[in-house]
Amino acid sequence: MKVDKLLEKPAFELGQKEKGPLFFEAMKESLKLHYGNCPEFRKFVDGQGIDVEKIGKVEDIPYLPVSIFKEVELVTGPKENIKTKILSSATTSGKPSQIPLDEVTSKRQQIALKNIMSSFLGKERMAFIVLDARETAQKSGDETSSRASAIRGMMPFAKSMHFVLNEKLEFEPKLLEEAVEKIGQGEKICFFGFTWLIYKTLLAIKEDGKREFEEATAKLGKERKVLHIGGWKKLKDIAVEKKQFNEEVGEFFEAEKGKVIDFYGMTEQLGTVYPDCGEGHKHLPLYSEIIIRDGQTFESLGIGKPGLIQLLTPLPNSYPGISVLTEDVGEIQGVDDCPCGRKGKYFEFRKRVEKAPLKGCGDTL
């Protein structure tokens, strides 16, 4: 399929003009697959009066509201092909999205993630110190949490992986000491975890355990990165902004400026993630596209105009999550001209809206 051909190419080397037709053809092929093999999705598309054969540009590909995955089970093809379900963290609504994955989708997601993150972490594996519990990553079965999935997704980049929180998500100095003893001197270090959990741990260590933390980490190599994902709403609730977070976390973990990397992504489209480059921009890889839509008219907006983020990717094979309107506000900042050298669009995530208007598209489905 065209999406698999797309995954053979580097994530950030093609300019937007070259990417455009390749991406659209992969999306059109994926759209037809889901239209023909997911009855609920077909009903939705038909209800919108859309003829999939006549779609001529990416902006016209129908999108699903992200909240629909919390309400309706959407599966493309035979249900017996589903190997696992990924559950989102449900921080806003209390109800998780349920994303069914087959082997084809999982493999594509792994390839995309590796291609994207290699551009930011490099090809040399690092020692990962994970600010989470080992039990989180070990949970398995028919359903897997988005946190577990995110941790496992980092394994290809880890020379070793060490967990320093207990089952109650409390910092354990002994676990850190054991990790430091196992990590070779001078090794590159990556502290990794969910945004809110990293900050919660930082505050707890500062209050009780700072000496033990400093003594242990003093033995680690000085080339350090902090990689974190998700959970900004919890920090917004306690008035912690991104700039403050980066400064505090960078100082605490002794990571140089530009080495605290926030990456944006969502359970509904695993594999395609959007890390900050050294300039603070989030880049679109070859395997996904962004459209910013007006919150009232849902018209597509241009560069420099904030609106609702719509993300598109042809990766999903087992569910119709190829075009999703999020509940997040963002802004496209530029195309092909970021000083970091990566090609394509780059954008800024601004905030989560309190209530995203569905304007009938969810009701139709």
Image (cartoon, grey):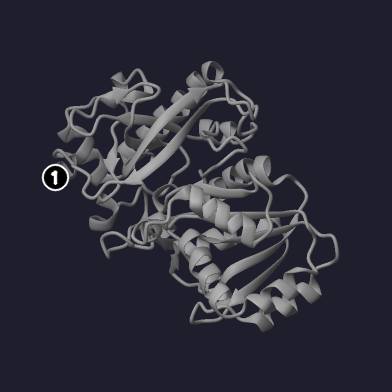
The number of numbered discs placed on residues in the rendered structure image is 1
- Which element carries disc 1, helix, strand or loop? helix
Q: Nearer the viewer, residue 32 or 174?
A: 174
Instruction: Relative to 177, say whether 346 is above or below.
Output: above
Is residue 71 toward the left or the right of residue 13 in the image? left
Residue drawn at x 65%, y 81% as measured from the top left = 173
Is residue 146 toward the left or the right of residue 299 in the image? right
The answer to which quarter of the image holds residue 30 is top left
Instruction: Relative to 344, say whether 218 is above or below.
Output: below
Q: Which residue is denoted by mark 1 in the rendering?
A: 363
Mark 1 belongs to which amino acid? Asp
The image position of residue 94, as x and y in percent, is 27, 65
- Whether residue 252 is visible here, answered yes or no, is yes
The image position of residue 193, as x and y in percent, is 55, 62
Is residue 347 toward the left or the right of residue 13 in the image? left
Is residue 348 toward the left or the right of residue 6 in the image? left
Residue drawn at x 61%, y 81% as measured from the top left = 172
- Whether residue 1 is visible here, answered yes or no, is no
Label 1 packing within 10 angstroms: few (<14), some (14-19), many (20+): few
The image position of residue 174, as x and y in percent, is 68, 83
The image position of residue 189, as x and y in percent, is 73, 59
Please identify the quadrant where the C terminus is shown.
top left
